[in-house]
Image (tube, grey):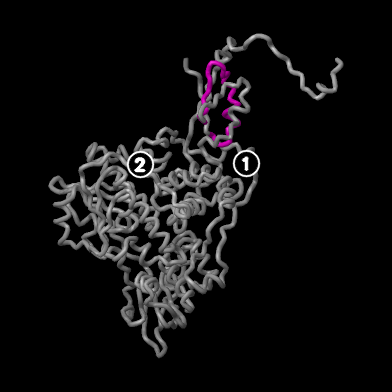
Amino acid sequence: MNLSDKNRNCVLTSRSNTSTLDNMTGSWRLLVPEYDEKTSPCSTFCPAGEDIAQAEMLVSKGEYEKAWRLILKENPFPSICGRICYHPCEEACNRKQLDDAVLIHVIERFAGDNAFLYNFDPEFKKFPKRSEKVAIVGAGPFGLSAAYFLSLLGYTCNVYEAMSEPGGILRWALPEFRLSSDILKKEIENIQKTGFPIHCSQEILQEDLDNLIEENDAIFFGCGNFLSSKLYIEGEDLYGVLDGLTFLREVKSGKINSICGNVVIIGGGNTAVDAARSVVRLGGTPVIVYRRNQENMPAFEEEVIAAVYEGVIIKTLLSPVLIEKNCDGLTVTFDKMKMVDASSNKIIKDSGKKEKISALMVITAVGQKPEMDWYLPDKYSGEVILQNNSTVVLDNKKPPLFFGGDLTNDFKTVTHAVASGKEAAISMDILFKEGADKINSILAESVTGNSTVLSFDIYCRGTRSKRSRHVVGFNEINTDYFEYTKKIKQPQLLRHERVKSFMEIDLNLSGSLAVKEAARCFNCGICNQCDNCRIYCPEMSVKLDNNIRSIDYDYCKGCGICVVECPTNAMTLKKEHN
């Protein structure tokens, strides 16, 4: 065949002069592909039940405002949790099996901070107003979360706080290098746009309870654990011995602004580590003393690593038995301990051996408890409904009582407090609408995947309620479509910069880095709009209309190519049912 120069580079294909529309190839089908969005494992490990895969996808596309609003559906504190949550979601991340887990908490913080930078409007969608009134005792993360979700459900809430400002331990004891007071204030102001007031400097005493019961249809107790546990050893009441929370509060208020000399911190939790890192910044030399091995410390591992990097000394297998005065300050006597075996946390004395450490100050941080017993649910009579993160006490003669946060949670974290507030709010809504006997069954219908983690969006029959509960595993991801890419490095202050002030250590992330990290997410189980299903369909039976994909089953042969080429496992191939 002679081709002109003009057509020499054309590709010749066969062509039919008749339409193929009458050839309904769908009649050959034995299997049916369906769009079937599923559940990502990270969401089932997030106590707040965030829609993480969807949020990461939105950030990766530069849709920061949508991502922020999506997070707010489940968690009122993205900027706070992005800073101080211990991010169990990242332990469950499927990407971890390819290279590194996605830095979900960093992206969450970016979305929250970016919203404040550009004054985004949260556009809260509230249910119709209801007649019931709710009193919430305590403006810590549980009380504020409960008020937030109750307000969205249409209830009138009043939050009562004993301190002069809301926030609980986040406001009064958490060091600025972990959480800026400005960020805390902005997050609280943002959620108050749902319409609930906070009455500060209004402590609720036991004698005030009758008035609350008379004026409200439900009472929520979210009083934090502000009372430090004692060592029960001689000398712990000496001058120069402070409990961890008192020390952190006095540092944050400016009452303690410098320290010279050794400071012994007894304990291994987050309060002990926060206190030690504060001592470094005040000029002292902190020594954390813990009765077990360092790997057994209950503090977050990242915080322990940061403490050591900043110069905190950690001594282990020492248990305090005596504090006494010396000419320069205090001396603490410890029993030397040893682990019974490597797999057990049990310790015993090491043949009566002792060690003494001298210090200017001793800080005790061995746990906290509520300041008043009457805050606890077991002090009230009635039917008790125990839940994962909260407790309900029902008395036919009185309004229902809801307890949450530190009062009921095994894990004393801000994210578990959010989960507790959400659970209590949903439980109350079910109680008033459906009755007490329906609480547990409806809660069970509102969890993410195969977990016990509640989703507010699922409870409200939002878009997530249409997803399958199947949790996508790494072997169900088509990793051919993902390049090997290591996680970004979170910008941080250097050691010599950290120890000079209480400035936040983790620095703000740029938009380009946030997009790069969010793009590493597999978006497990949800459609990431890659269009592989359309591109690879041999029958062109996948249709796209207003960004919604559908399958024309008149022509779909059920070959399953679309399902195989879906990188995120957002499709399923099923048997044809005639």
Report whether residue 364 is seen.
no
Q: Residues within 10 Å of mark 2 (few under 14, many from 20)?
A: few
> Mainly helix, strand or loop, the magenta region?
loop
- Residue pointed to by mark 1: 482
Q: Residues within 10 Å of mark 1 (few under 14, many from 20)?
A: some
Q: Quadrant of the N terminus?
A: top right
Task: Indicate the quadrant where residue 239 lies.
Answer: bottom left
Find the residue positioned furthest to the front.
Answer: 6
Where disc 2 sits, the SS reads loop
The location of residue 332, given as percent across then percent down, is: 40, 80
Where disc 1 sits, the SS reads loop
Foreground of the two, 38 or 264 = 38
Q: Is residue 466 above or below residue 364?
A: above
Q: Which residues are magenta?
A: 547-569
Name the kind of residue labelled 2 in the image: Lys
Foreground of the two, 438 or 14 = 14
Find the residue positioned furthest to the bottom.
Answer: 327
The location of residue 498, given as percent across then percent down, is: 53, 70
Q: Which mark is residue 125?
A: 2
Task: Indicate the quadrant where residue 165 lies.
Answer: bottom left
The first of marks 2 and 1 along the sequence is 2
Q: Give the residue displayed 36% in from the left and 84% down from the top.
A: 324
Q: Is residue 375 left or right of residue 319?
A: left
Q: Is residue 392 left or right of residue 299?
A: left
Q: Which mark is residue 335?
A: none
Q: Is residue 526 magenta?
A: no
